Image (spheres, rainbow, N blue to C red):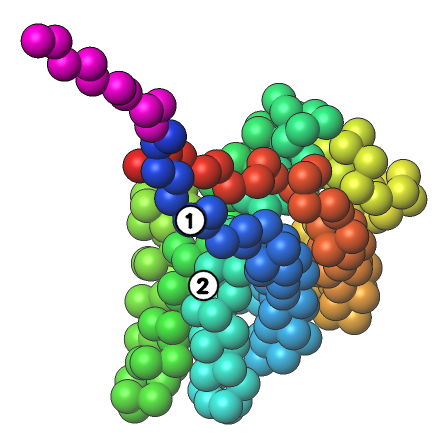
Amino acid sequence: MSTTLSTQPTTPAVSRPPRDLRRTTRILAAVAIVLGPVLVTVLRAILPYWTNEDPATSIEKIAASPGAISAVNWISVISYPFLLAGALAVGYAARRRTPLLALVSSLVLFGGLGLASMVGGSDLVAEVMTRGGYDNAVTADVTLRYMEHPAGLFGLLGFVLGHIVGMILVGITAVRARLVPVWVGAAIIVAQPVHVIASVIVPNRALDVVAGWGLTAVGFAFIALAVLRMDDDEWDAPPAVSPR
């Protein structure tokens, strides 16, 4: 007596497709890209002192404007994550058309902006000491020592060089990746050198707010708009469905 066993082909169970978040991530990336430069533009507009002034003069103005320096410090804290995320998001948006340039530009900009906290830290020290009743001369001496510390100098130089070179590379990348017109890329390229000129060489707050960080914000707004208009498949691959 024999027994015949029949086997039926089995189909592997397939898990439920994961949610497609590409549209959500594009929106979040666009917000980060534009919000960081906008916040810095506001910060530069309300800064109670100017970057070329000596420590004693700066501390006197900070002590006379506690509300302004408090707002500056809060804007600094809030803007850092958006600036860093925006630097990476720009590179991500451009990576398929200019992979190497997108990688280099986003990493240089990310590295430079990552050191911005070393520069902004002196404003927080100044606010804490002036609110604490310390003499202005003592506060000026402490903030100067902070900036002259080797780590402070490294942070300052790294921030200045990194974010200027990074912004120039981002402007080139955005044009090469066809995210923005040539004139927008040119605006991004020249904006941060103008910021340096308006901050130190020919001190001018209005020039910085309009043609420095303000122009950077406008250029990044165009990049953000390009990201919002981008097709999901161009932005990222769809989520994969794996068998159980």
Tell which of 34 and 205 is nearer to you.
34
Q: Quadrant of residue 63?
A: bottom left
Alpha carbons under labels 1 and 2: distance apart: 47 Å
- The quadrant of the picture occupied by the N terminus is top left
**Residue at (58, 36) in percent of width and height:** 237
Circles 1, 2 touching at the beta carbon (< 8 Å): no
Tell which of 191 and 86 is nearer to you.
86
Indicate the position of residue 78 as horizontal and vertical percent values: 47, 70
- The quadrant of the picture occupied by the C terminus is top left
Which residue in the structure is indicated by mark 1? 16
**Residue at (67, 28) in percent of width and height:** 96
Element type at mark 2? helix
In the rendered image, the residue lying farthest to the top is 1
**Residue at (67, 67) in percent of width and height:** 38
Q: In the rendered structure, which disc, 1 or 2, sits on the residue that comes first in sequence?
A: 1
Which residue in the structure is indicated by mark 2? 120
Q: Quadrant of residue 100?
A: top right
Residue segment shown in magenta? 1-10
